[in-house]
Protein backbone atom coordinates (compact mmCIF):
# COMPACT_ATOMS: atom_id res chain seq x y z
CA UNK A 1 0.00 0.00 0.00
CA UNK A 2 1.21 3.51 -0.79
CA UNK A 3 2.24 5.38 2.34
CA UNK A 4 1.40 9.04 1.75
CA UNK A 5 3.37 10.33 4.74
CA UNK A 6 2.55 13.63 6.39
CA UNK A 7 2.06 16.98 4.72
CA UNK A 8 5.45 18.03 6.04
CA UNK A 9 7.03 14.96 4.44
CA UNK A 10 5.52 15.89 1.08
CA UNK A 11 6.34 19.59 1.22
CA UNK A 12 7.90 21.47 4.17
CA UNK A 13 5.61 24.46 3.81
CA UNK A 14 5.58 25.44 7.46
CA UNK A 15 9.29 26.27 7.43
CA UNK A 16 9.18 27.92 4.03
CA UNK A 17 6.34 30.29 4.92
CA UNK A 18 7.29 30.90 8.54
CA UNK A 19 7.68 34.62 7.78
CA UNK A 20 4.15 34.94 6.48
CA UNK A 21 1.99 34.59 3.38
CA UNK A 22 2.26 38.14 2.03
CA UNK A 23 4.94 38.96 -0.53
CA UNK A 24 5.46 42.72 -0.71
CA UNK A 25 8.42 44.57 -2.25
CA UNK A 26 10.43 41.36 -2.60
CA UNK A 27 9.96 40.01 0.93
CA UNK A 28 7.70 37.57 2.75
CA UNK A 29 5.87 39.21 5.60
CA UNK A 30 3.00 38.52 7.96
CA UNK A 31 -0.52 39.86 7.55
CA UNK A 32 -2.13 42.56 9.66
CA UNK A 33 -5.78 41.47 9.76
CA UNK A 34 -5.42 39.85 13.16
CA UNK A 35 -6.94 36.60 11.81
CA UNK A 36 -5.21 33.39 10.83
CA UNK A 37 -6.03 30.81 8.20
CA UNK A 38 -4.83 27.25 7.66
CA UNK A 39 -3.85 25.64 4.37
CA UNK A 40 -5.32 22.13 4.54
CA UNK A 41 -4.39 19.03 2.54
CA UNK A 42 -7.81 18.04 1.13
CA UNK A 43 -6.71 14.44 0.67
CA UNK A 44 -6.29 13.88 4.42
CA UNK A 45 -7.68 16.92 6.25
CA UNK A 46 -4.22 17.54 7.69
CA UNK A 47 -3.11 21.12 8.30
CA UNK A 48 -0.19 22.09 6.07
CA UNK A 49 0.58 25.51 7.53
CA UNK A 50 -1.13 28.44 9.24
CA UNK A 51 -0.62 32.07 8.30
CA UNK A 52 -2.00 35.49 9.15
CA UNK A 53 -4.46 36.84 6.61
CA UNK A 54 -3.86 40.11 4.80
CA UNK A 55 -5.81 43.16 5.90
CA UNK A 56 -6.42 46.44 4.11
CA UNK A 57 -3.09 47.81 5.40
CA UNK A 58 -1.28 44.99 3.61
CA UNK A 59 -3.12 45.76 0.40
CA UNK A 60 -2.16 49.43 0.72
CA UNK A 61 1.49 48.47 1.29
CA UNK A 62 1.51 46.15 -1.73
CA UNK A 63 -0.10 48.75 -3.99
CA UNK A 64 2.41 51.36 -2.77
CA UNK A 65 5.29 48.99 -3.57
CA UNK A 66 3.88 48.32 -7.03
CA UNK A 67 3.33 52.00 -7.65
CA UNK A 68 6.91 52.80 -6.62
CA UNK A 69 8.32 50.09 -8.88
CA UNK A 70 6.20 51.07 -11.89
CA UNK A 71 8.21 53.95 -13.42
CA UNK A 72 11.46 52.01 -13.67
CA UNK A 73 9.83 48.79 -14.85
CA UNK A 74 7.68 50.62 -17.40
CA UNK A 75 10.77 52.50 -18.53
CA UNK A 76 12.80 49.35 -19.08
CA UNK A 77 13.31 48.38 -22.70
CA UNK A 78 11.30 45.49 -24.10
CA UNK A 79 14.56 43.59 -24.38
CA UNK A 80 15.32 44.10 -20.69
CA UNK A 81 11.89 42.89 -19.65
CA UNK A 82 12.20 39.95 -22.03
CA UNK A 83 15.57 38.94 -20.62
CA UNK A 84 14.19 39.05 -17.08
CA UNK A 85 11.26 36.84 -18.04
CA UNK A 86 13.56 34.35 -19.78
CA UNK A 87 15.57 34.12 -16.57
CA UNK A 88 12.30 33.68 -14.69
CA UNK A 89 11.34 30.74 -16.92
CA UNK A 90 14.70 29.13 -16.22
CA UNK A 91 14.26 29.47 -12.44
CA UNK A 92 10.77 27.96 -12.68
CA UNK A 93 12.16 25.02 -14.65
CA UNK A 94 14.83 24.42 -12.02
CA UNK A 95 12.15 24.35 -9.29
CA UNK A 96 9.54 22.42 -11.28
CA UNK A 97 9.29 19.47 -8.88
CA UNK A 98 8.94 21.78 -5.89
CA UNK A 99 6.07 23.60 -7.59
CA UNK A 100 4.40 20.35 -8.64
CA UNK A 101 4.43 18.97 -5.11
CA UNK A 102 3.18 22.18 -3.53
CA UNK A 103 0.33 22.46 -6.04
CA UNK A 104 -0.70 18.85 -5.46
CA UNK A 105 -0.61 19.26 -1.71
CA UNK A 106 -2.72 22.42 -1.43
CA UNK A 107 -5.25 21.53 -4.17
CA UNK A 108 -5.48 17.74 -4.00
CA UNK A 109 -4.45 17.39 -7.66
CA UNK A 110 -2.76 14.14 -8.68
CA UNK A 111 0.97 14.72 -8.80
CA UNK A 112 1.10 13.37 -12.34
CA UNK A 113 -1.27 16.19 -13.39
CA UNK A 114 0.78 18.96 -11.81
CA UNK A 115 4.00 17.49 -13.20
CA UNK A 116 2.69 17.06 -16.73
CA UNK A 117 0.21 19.93 -17.06
CA UNK A 118 0.16 22.70 -14.45
CA UNK A 119 3.88 23.30 -14.03
CA UNK A 120 5.04 22.75 -17.65
CA UNK A 121 2.16 24.96 -18.81
CA UNK A 122 3.28 27.73 -16.46
CA UNK A 123 6.89 27.52 -17.64
CA UNK A 124 5.74 27.59 -21.26
CA UNK A 125 3.55 30.63 -20.55
CA UNK A 126 6.52 32.42 -19.01
CA UNK A 127 8.68 31.67 -22.03
CA UNK A 128 5.90 32.84 -24.37
CA UNK A 129 5.52 36.22 -22.67
CA UNK A 130 9.29 36.59 -22.50
CA UNK A 131 9.19 36.56 -26.28
CA UNK A 132 6.03 38.64 -26.52
CA UNK A 133 7.64 41.42 -24.48
CA UNK A 134 9.73 42.31 -27.55
CA UNK A 135 6.71 42.52 -29.85
CA UNK A 136 4.50 45.16 -28.33
CA UNK A 137 3.84 47.34 -31.34
CA UNK A 138 1.91 50.49 -32.06
CA UNK A 139 0.86 51.52 -35.55
CA UNK A 140 3.05 52.82 -38.36
CA UNK A 141 3.14 56.56 -38.84
CA UNK A 142 0.92 58.17 -41.43
CA UNK A 143 -0.36 61.52 -42.61
CA UNK A 144 -4.08 61.40 -42.00
CA UNK A 145 -4.75 65.11 -41.60
CA UNK A 146 -3.00 67.54 -43.87
CA UNK A 147 0.48 68.42 -42.60
CA UNK A 148 0.22 66.28 -39.48
CA UNK A 149 1.80 62.89 -38.84
CA UNK A 150 0.04 60.51 -36.46
CA UNK A 151 1.05 57.27 -34.85
CA UNK A 152 -0.14 55.00 -32.06
CA UNK A 153 1.76 54.19 -28.89
CA UNK A 154 0.92 51.18 -26.72
CA UNK A 155 1.83 51.91 -23.12
CA UNK A 156 1.52 50.06 -19.81
CA UNK A 157 -1.49 50.96 -17.70
CA UNK A 158 0.07 51.12 -14.22
CA UNK A 159 -0.64 49.00 -11.17
CA UNK A 160 -2.81 45.97 -11.96
CA UNK A 161 -4.82 44.40 -9.15
CA UNK A 162 -5.49 40.74 -9.90
CA UNK A 163 -7.60 38.14 -8.12
CA UNK A 164 -7.04 34.45 -8.87
CA UNK A 165 -9.11 31.37 -7.96
CA UNK A 166 -8.20 28.17 -6.13
CA UNK A 167 -8.65 25.60 -8.91
CA UNK A 168 -5.42 26.35 -10.79
CA UNK A 169 -3.48 28.60 -8.38
CA UNK A 170 -0.12 28.46 -10.15
CA UNK A 171 -1.41 28.74 -13.69
CA UNK A 172 -3.89 31.47 -12.83
CA UNK A 173 -1.15 33.48 -11.12
CA UNK A 174 0.91 33.13 -14.28
CA UNK A 175 -1.96 34.03 -16.61
CA UNK A 176 -2.57 37.23 -14.66
CA UNK A 177 0.97 38.29 -13.84
CA UNK A 178 2.94 37.46 -16.99
CA UNK A 179 1.17 39.53 -19.69
CA UNK A 180 0.87 42.45 -17.29
CA UNK A 181 4.57 42.60 -16.39
CA UNK A 182 5.69 41.80 -19.95
CA UNK A 183 3.85 44.95 -21.04
CA UNK A 184 5.55 47.03 -18.33
CA UNK A 185 2.90 47.04 -15.60
CA UNK A 186 3.37 46.10 -11.97
CA UNK A 187 1.01 43.71 -10.18
CA UNK A 188 -0.65 43.01 -6.86
CA UNK A 189 -2.18 39.54 -6.92
CA UNK A 190 -4.65 38.18 -4.38
CA UNK A 191 -4.73 34.38 -4.56
CA UNK A 192 -7.39 32.33 -2.84
CA UNK A 193 -6.72 32.00 0.86
CA UNK A 194 -7.21 28.23 0.38
CA UNK A 195 -4.28 27.83 -2.00
CA UNK A 196 -1.65 30.59 -1.66
CA UNK A 197 1.55 28.51 -1.60
CA UNK A 198 2.51 28.37 -5.28
CA UNK A 199 1.59 32.02 -5.89
CA UNK A 200 4.04 33.01 -3.16
CA UNK A 201 6.68 30.68 -4.60
CA UNK A 202 6.05 32.18 -8.05
CA UNK A 203 6.68 35.71 -6.78
CA UNK A 204 9.83 34.62 -4.93
CA UNK A 205 11.13 32.91 -8.08
CA UNK A 206 10.58 36.14 -10.02
CA UNK A 207 12.67 38.09 -7.52
CA UNK A 208 15.37 35.42 -7.61
CA UNK A 209 15.40 35.72 -11.41
CA UNK A 210 16.16 39.44 -11.15
CA UNK A 211 12.71 40.97 -11.66
CA UNK A 212 12.84 44.10 -9.47
CA UNK A 213 11.26 44.19 -6.04
CA UNK A 214 7.75 45.58 -6.10
CA UNK A 215 6.96 44.48 -9.65
CA UNK A 216 5.12 41.37 -8.39
CA UNK A 217 3.38 41.45 -5.01
CA UNK A 218 1.08 38.90 -3.33
CA UNK A 219 -1.55 39.60 -0.67
CA UNK A 220 -3.26 36.55 0.80
CA UNK A 221 -6.55 37.51 2.36
CA UNK A 222 -10.28 37.09 2.03
CA UNK A 223 -12.21 38.37 -0.94
CA UNK A 224 -14.47 40.47 1.25
CA UNK A 225 -11.64 42.35 2.93
CA UNK A 226 -8.44 42.18 0.88
CA UNK A 227 -10.09 41.53 -2.50
CA UNK A 228 -12.66 44.29 -2.40
CA UNK A 229 -10.12 46.78 -1.07
CA UNK A 230 -7.74 45.90 -3.91
CA UNK A 231 -10.44 46.31 -6.57
CA UNK A 232 -11.56 49.66 -5.17
CA UNK A 233 -8.07 51.04 -4.51
CA UNK A 234 -7.65 54.42 -6.27
CA UNK A 235 -4.03 53.65 -7.24
CA UNK A 236 -4.98 50.44 -9.02
CA UNK A 237 -5.50 51.21 -12.69
CA UNK A 238 -6.89 47.85 -13.81
CA UNK A 239 -8.52 44.83 -12.18
CA UNK A 240 -8.26 41.30 -13.56
CA UNK A 241 -10.52 38.71 -11.93
CA UNK A 242 -11.11 35.00 -12.45
CA UNK A 243 -13.90 33.34 -10.51
CA UNK A 244 -17.66 32.96 -10.34
CA UNK A 245 -20.05 35.13 -12.31
CA UNK A 246 -21.72 36.32 -9.10
CA UNK A 247 -18.45 37.61 -7.66
CA UNK A 248 -17.45 39.00 -11.05
CA UNK A 249 -20.55 41.20 -11.00
CA UNK A 250 -19.49 42.49 -7.59
CA UNK A 251 -15.98 43.22 -8.90
CA UNK A 252 -17.45 45.18 -11.81
CA UNK A 253 -19.68 47.14 -9.44
CA UNK A 254 -16.76 48.18 -7.22
CA UNK A 255 -14.50 49.00 -10.18
CA UNK A 256 -17.01 51.48 -11.61
CA UNK A 257 -16.38 53.86 -8.71
CA UNK A 258 -12.91 54.62 -10.05
CA UNK A 259 -13.72 53.87 -13.72
CA UNK A 260 -10.87 51.37 -13.95
CA UNK A 261 -10.46 48.83 -16.68
CA UNK A 262 -11.65 45.33 -15.80
CA UNK A 263 -10.89 41.90 -17.19
CA UNK A 264 -13.31 39.14 -16.17
CA UNK A 265 -12.95 35.39 -16.74
CA UNK A 266 -16.05 33.97 -15.09
CA UNK A 267 -18.13 30.81 -14.84
CA UNK A 268 -18.60 28.12 -17.43
CA UNK A 269 -20.89 25.20 -18.20
CA UNK A 270 -19.32 23.75 -21.32
CA UNK A 271 -21.50 21.75 -23.73
CA UNK A 272 -20.13 18.59 -25.34
CA UNK A 273 -22.13 17.99 -28.54
CA UNK A 274 -21.92 14.51 -30.07
CA UNK A 275 -23.43 14.15 -33.55
CA UNK A 276 -24.54 10.75 -34.80
CA UNK A 277 -21.55 10.33 -37.14
CA UNK A 278 -18.98 10.87 -34.37
CA UNK A 279 -16.32 8.35 -33.40
CA UNK A 280 -18.14 7.01 -30.35
CA UNK A 281 -15.09 5.61 -28.58
CA UNK A 282 -13.21 8.89 -28.97
CA UNK A 283 -16.24 10.85 -27.75
CA UNK A 284 -16.69 8.68 -24.67
CA UNK A 285 -13.02 8.99 -23.75
CA UNK A 286 -13.14 12.72 -24.41
CA UNK A 287 -16.24 13.17 -22.26
CA UNK A 288 -14.77 11.36 -19.26
CA UNK A 289 -11.43 13.16 -19.50
CA UNK A 290 -13.11 16.50 -20.17
CA UNK A 291 -15.58 16.13 -17.30
CA UNK A 292 -13.12 14.87 -14.69
CA UNK A 293 -10.07 17.04 -15.36
CA UNK A 294 -8.95 18.55 -12.06
CA UNK A 295 -11.83 16.65 -10.37
CA UNK A 296 -14.24 18.69 -12.48
CA UNK A 297 -13.06 21.95 -10.91
CA UNK A 298 -12.43 23.61 -14.24
CA UNK A 299 -14.64 26.25 -15.83
CA UNK A 300 -14.01 24.71 -19.27
CA UNK A 301 -14.79 21.14 -18.11
CA UNK A 302 -17.30 19.13 -20.12
CA UNK A 303 -20.42 19.33 -17.98
CA UNK A 304 -23.36 18.90 -20.41
CA UNK A 305 -23.09 16.17 -23.05
CA UNK A 306 -25.74 16.46 -25.77
CA UNK A 307 -25.78 13.21 -27.74
CA UNK A 308 -27.76 12.65 -30.93
CA UNK A 309 -30.44 10.00 -30.41
CA UNK A 310 -28.89 7.08 -32.42
CA UNK A 311 -25.79 7.13 -30.17
CA UNK A 312 -27.39 8.21 -26.90
CA UNK A 313 -28.01 4.89 -25.10
CA UNK A 314 -24.62 3.43 -25.98
CA UNK A 315 -22.86 6.66 -25.08
CA UNK A 316 -24.46 6.64 -21.61
CA UNK A 317 -23.62 2.97 -21.05
CA UNK A 318 -20.01 3.25 -22.14
CA UNK A 319 -19.40 6.55 -20.34
CA UNK A 320 -20.72 5.12 -17.06
CA UNK A 321 -18.54 2.03 -17.45
CA UNK A 322 -15.44 4.11 -18.12
CA UNK A 323 -16.16 6.43 -15.17
CA UNK A 324 -16.31 3.39 -12.89
CA UNK A 325 -12.71 2.50 -13.81
CA UNK A 326 -11.34 5.88 -12.71
CA UNK A 327 -9.06 5.42 -9.70
CA UNK A 328 -9.57 7.78 -6.77
CA UNK A 329 -6.71 7.98 -4.32
CA UNK A 330 -3.82 9.77 -2.73
CA UNK A 331 -2.66 12.55 -5.10
CA UNK A 332 0.96 11.53 -4.55
CA UNK A 333 0.37 7.86 -5.47
CA UNK A 334 1.49 6.99 -9.03
CA UNK A 335 -1.75 5.16 -9.93
CA UNK A 336 -4.20 7.89 -8.89
CA UNK A 337 -6.42 9.31 -11.64
CA UNK A 338 -8.63 11.57 -9.53
CA UNK A 339 -7.86 13.42 -6.33
CA UNK A 340 -10.17 15.09 -3.83
CA UNK A 341 -12.05 18.32 -4.28
CA UNK A 342 -10.28 21.36 -2.89
CA UNK A 343 -12.14 21.36 0.44
CA UNK A 344 -14.86 19.66 2.43
CA UNK A 345 -17.09 22.66 1.74
CA UNK A 346 -16.67 22.20 -2.00
CA UNK A 347 -17.37 18.47 -1.72
CA UNK A 348 -20.56 19.20 0.21
CA UNK A 349 -21.58 21.80 -2.37
CA UNK A 350 -21.18 19.26 -5.19
CA UNK A 351 -23.06 16.62 -3.20
CA UNK A 352 -25.89 19.09 -2.68
CA UNK A 353 -26.31 19.60 -6.42
CA UNK A 354 -26.45 15.85 -7.02
CA UNK A 355 -28.80 15.15 -4.12
CA UNK A 356 -31.25 17.82 -5.31
CA UNK A 357 -31.08 16.42 -8.84
CA UNK A 358 -32.34 13.01 -7.66
CA UNK A 359 -35.81 14.55 -7.42
CA UNK A 360 -36.01 15.08 -11.20
CA UNK A 361 -33.17 13.05 -12.79
CA UNK A 362 -31.44 9.66 -12.55
CA UNK A 363 -27.94 9.11 -11.19
CA UNK A 364 -26.41 6.33 -13.34
CA UNK A 365 -23.14 6.02 -11.44
CA UNK A 366 -21.37 7.81 -8.61
CA UNK A 367 -23.33 10.33 -6.60
CA UNK A 368 -21.56 9.72 -3.29
CA UNK A 369 -18.37 10.19 -1.33
CA UNK A 370 -16.16 7.09 -1.11
CA UNK A 371 -15.80 5.15 2.11
CA UNK A 372 -12.84 3.20 3.46
CA UNK A 373 -9.37 4.70 3.51
CA UNK A 374 -10.46 7.80 1.54
CA UNK A 375 -13.24 8.76 3.94
CA UNK A 376 -11.17 11.49 5.65
CA UNK A 377 -10.50 13.36 2.41
CA UNK A 378 -12.75 15.65 0.36
CA UNK A 379 -13.38 12.98 -2.28
CA UNK A 380 -16.47 12.50 -4.45
CA UNK A 381 -17.02 9.72 -6.96
CA UNK A 382 -17.28 10.47 -10.69
CA UNK A 383 -20.98 10.99 -11.32
CA UNK A 384 -23.13 10.54 -14.42
CA UNK A 385 -26.69 11.92 -14.51
CA UNK A 386 -29.40 11.44 -17.16
CA UNK A 387 -33.07 12.36 -17.68
CA UNK A 388 -32.60 15.91 -16.37
CA UNK A 389 -34.79 18.67 -17.87
CA UNK A 390 -32.94 21.34 -19.85
CA UNK A 391 -34.10 24.06 -17.45
CA UNK A 392 -33.06 22.18 -14.29
CA UNK A 393 -30.43 23.33 -11.84
CA UNK A 394 -28.01 20.51 -12.64
CA UNK A 395 -28.04 21.52 -16.33
CA UNK A 396 -28.02 25.30 -15.95
CA UNK A 397 -25.76 25.92 -12.93
CA UNK A 398 -22.02 25.45 -12.52
CA UNK A 399 -21.44 22.47 -10.22
CA UNK A 400 -17.60 22.58 -10.31
CA UNK A 401 -17.14 18.92 -9.48
CA UNK A 402 -16.80 15.49 -11.16
CA UNK A 403 -20.36 15.50 -12.53
CA UNK A 404 -21.48 15.01 -16.15
CA UNK A 405 -25.09 15.35 -17.31
CA UNK A 406 -26.05 13.59 -20.58
CA UNK A 407 -29.09 14.66 -22.61
CA UNK A 408 -30.38 13.43 -26.00
CA UNK A 409 -31.23 15.51 -29.07
CA UNK A 410 -32.75 14.68 -32.45
CA UNK A 411 -31.80 17.26 -35.08
CA UNK A 412 -28.60 19.25 -35.53
CA UNK A 413 -30.56 22.45 -35.01
CA UNK A 414 -31.83 21.15 -31.67
CA UNK A 415 -28.38 20.07 -30.50
CA UNK A 416 -26.84 23.49 -31.12
CA UNK A 417 -29.85 25.29 -29.66
CA UNK A 418 -29.68 23.29 -26.42
CA UNK A 419 -25.92 23.76 -26.19
CA UNK A 420 -26.38 27.53 -26.39
CA UNK A 421 -29.38 27.60 -24.05
CA UNK A 422 -27.44 28.71 -20.96
CA UNK A 423 -26.10 32.01 -19.54
CA UNK A 424 -22.45 30.96 -19.94
CA UNK A 425 -20.19 30.83 -22.98
CA UNK A 426 -16.62 30.00 -22.05
CA UNK A 427 -15.94 26.79 -23.96
CA UNK A 428 -17.66 24.05 -25.97
CA UNK A 429 -16.82 21.04 -28.10
CA UNK A 430 -18.43 19.26 -31.03
CA UNK A 431 -17.81 15.70 -32.18
CA UNK A 432 -18.35 14.76 -35.83
CA UNK A 433 -16.54 13.23 -38.82
CA UNK A 434 -18.39 15.60 -41.17
CA UNK A 435 -16.41 18.75 -41.92
CA UNK A 436 -19.56 20.74 -42.72
CA UNK A 437 -21.23 19.81 -39.44
CA UNK A 438 -18.06 20.62 -37.55
CA UNK A 439 -17.65 23.95 -39.31
CA UNK A 440 -21.25 24.86 -38.55
CA UNK A 441 -20.65 24.08 -34.88
CA UNK A 442 -17.62 26.38 -34.76
CA UNK A 443 -19.74 29.20 -36.17
CA UNK A 444 -22.89 28.73 -34.11
CA UNK A 445 -21.73 27.56 -30.68
CA UNK A 446 -21.59 30.71 -28.56
CA UNK A 447 -18.36 30.21 -26.66
CA UNK A 448 -14.91 31.72 -26.54
CA UNK A 449 -13.29 28.41 -27.46
CA UNK A 450 -14.77 25.61 -29.56
CA UNK A 451 -12.90 22.31 -29.85
CA UNK A 452 -13.64 19.81 -32.61
CA UNK A 453 -13.20 16.12 -31.67
CA UNK A 454 -11.37 17.09 -28.51
CA UNK A 455 -12.08 18.87 -25.25
CA UNK A 456 -9.86 20.80 -22.79
CA UNK A 457 -6.39 21.38 -24.38
CA UNK A 458 -5.05 24.94 -24.29
CA UNK A 459 -1.86 26.51 -25.63
CA UNK A 460 0.04 29.68 -24.77
CA UNK A 461 -0.23 31.09 -28.28
CA UNK A 462 -4.04 31.10 -28.38
CA UNK A 463 -6.53 33.14 -26.30
CA UNK A 464 -8.77 31.92 -23.50
CA UNK A 465 -11.88 33.86 -22.53
CA UNK A 466 -15.63 33.85 -22.71
CA UNK A 467 -18.86 35.08 -24.22
CA UNK A 468 -22.05 36.10 -22.39
CA UNK A 469 -21.91 35.77 -18.58
CA UNK A 470 -18.56 34.01 -18.79
CA UNK A 471 -17.05 37.48 -18.92
CA UNK A 472 -14.81 39.38 -21.31
CA UNK A 473 -11.12 39.77 -21.96
CA UNK A 474 -8.56 37.15 -22.89
CA UNK A 475 -5.88 35.22 -21.03
CA UNK A 476 -2.74 33.90 -22.77
CA UNK A 477 -1.68 34.83 -26.33
CA UNK A 478 -0.89 38.23 -27.82
CA UNK A 479 -4.53 39.21 -27.29
CA UNK A 480 -3.97 38.96 -23.54
CA UNK A 481 -0.76 40.96 -23.84
CA UNK A 482 -2.59 43.85 -25.51
CA UNK A 483 -5.28 43.85 -22.79
CA UNK A 484 -2.69 45.15 -20.33
CA UNK A 485 -1.83 48.18 -22.46
CA UNK A 486 -3.49 51.48 -23.23
CA UNK A 487 -3.43 53.22 -26.59
CA UNK A 488 -2.18 56.75 -27.08
CA UNK A 489 -2.56 58.78 -30.26
CA UNK A 490 0.46 61.00 -30.93
CA UNK A 491 0.19 63.79 -33.56
CA UNK A 492 2.99 66.00 -34.94
CA UNK A 493 2.55 69.25 -36.84
CA UNK A 494 5.06 68.85 -39.66
CA UNK A 495 5.23 72.57 -40.48
CA UNK A 496 7.72 74.87 -38.81
CA UNK A 497 5.32 77.82 -38.46
CA UNK A 498 2.51 78.68 -36.08
CA UNK A 499 -0.77 77.58 -37.63
CA UNK A 500 -2.69 80.84 -37.38
CA UNK A 501 -5.40 79.54 -39.69
CA UNK A 502 -6.22 76.78 -37.15
CA UNK A 503 -6.36 79.28 -34.30
CA UNK A 504 -8.63 81.50 -36.39
CA UNK A 505 -10.94 78.57 -37.12
CA UNK A 506 -11.31 77.78 -33.45
CA UNK A 507 -11.36 81.24 -31.86
CA UNK A 508 -12.28 83.57 -34.68
CA UNK A 509 -10.38 86.76 -35.59
CA UNK A 510 -8.61 88.63 -32.79
Image (cartoon, grey):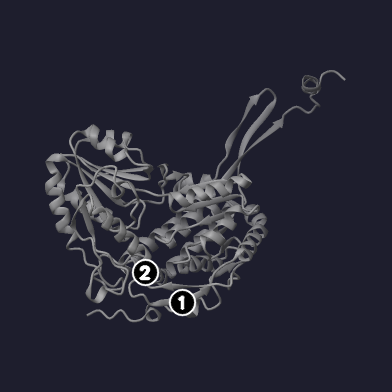
Outermost front residue: 359
| Tag 1 secondary structure | strand
Image quadrant holding the N terminus, namely: bottom left
In the depicted structure, whether residue 426 falls above or below residue 114: above
> In the image, is 330 to the left or to the right of 205?
left
Q: Is residue 476 visible?
A: no
Of labels 1 and 2, earlier in sequence is: 1
**Residue at image coords 26%, 73%:** 374
The reply to whether residue 163 is visible in this rendering is yes
Residue at image mark 1: 49
- Vertical position of residue 277 compared to residue 403: above or below: above
Residue 174: assigned label: none
x and y percent of residue 357 in the render? 26, 53
* Count of numbered tags: 2
Left or right relative to 472: residue 385: left
Relative image position of residue 19 (x, y in whole percent): 56, 77
The spot of residue 337 in percent (x, y) is 25, 65
In the displayed structure, 155 sits above or below 123; it is above
Q: Is residue 466 left or right of residue 421?
A: right
Crowding at mark 1 (Cα within 10 Å: few <14, some 14-19, many 20+): many
| x, y percent for residue 71 | 67, 55
Q: Which mark is residue 104?
A: 2
Element carrying mark 2: helix
Amino acid sequence: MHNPGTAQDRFPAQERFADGAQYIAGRLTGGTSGRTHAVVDPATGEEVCTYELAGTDDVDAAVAAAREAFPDWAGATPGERSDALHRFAAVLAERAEDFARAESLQCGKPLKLTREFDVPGTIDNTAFFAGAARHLQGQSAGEFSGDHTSYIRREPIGVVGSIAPWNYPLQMAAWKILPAVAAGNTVVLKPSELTPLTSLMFAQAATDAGIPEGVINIVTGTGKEAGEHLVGHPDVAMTSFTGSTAVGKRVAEIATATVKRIHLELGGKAPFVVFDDADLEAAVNGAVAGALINTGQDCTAATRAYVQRPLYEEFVERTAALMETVRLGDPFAPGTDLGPLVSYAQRDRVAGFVDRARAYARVVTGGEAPRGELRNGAYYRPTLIVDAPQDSEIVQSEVFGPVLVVLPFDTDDEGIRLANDIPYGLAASAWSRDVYRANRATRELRAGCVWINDHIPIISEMPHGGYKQSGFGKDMSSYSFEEYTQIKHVMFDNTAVVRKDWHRTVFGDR
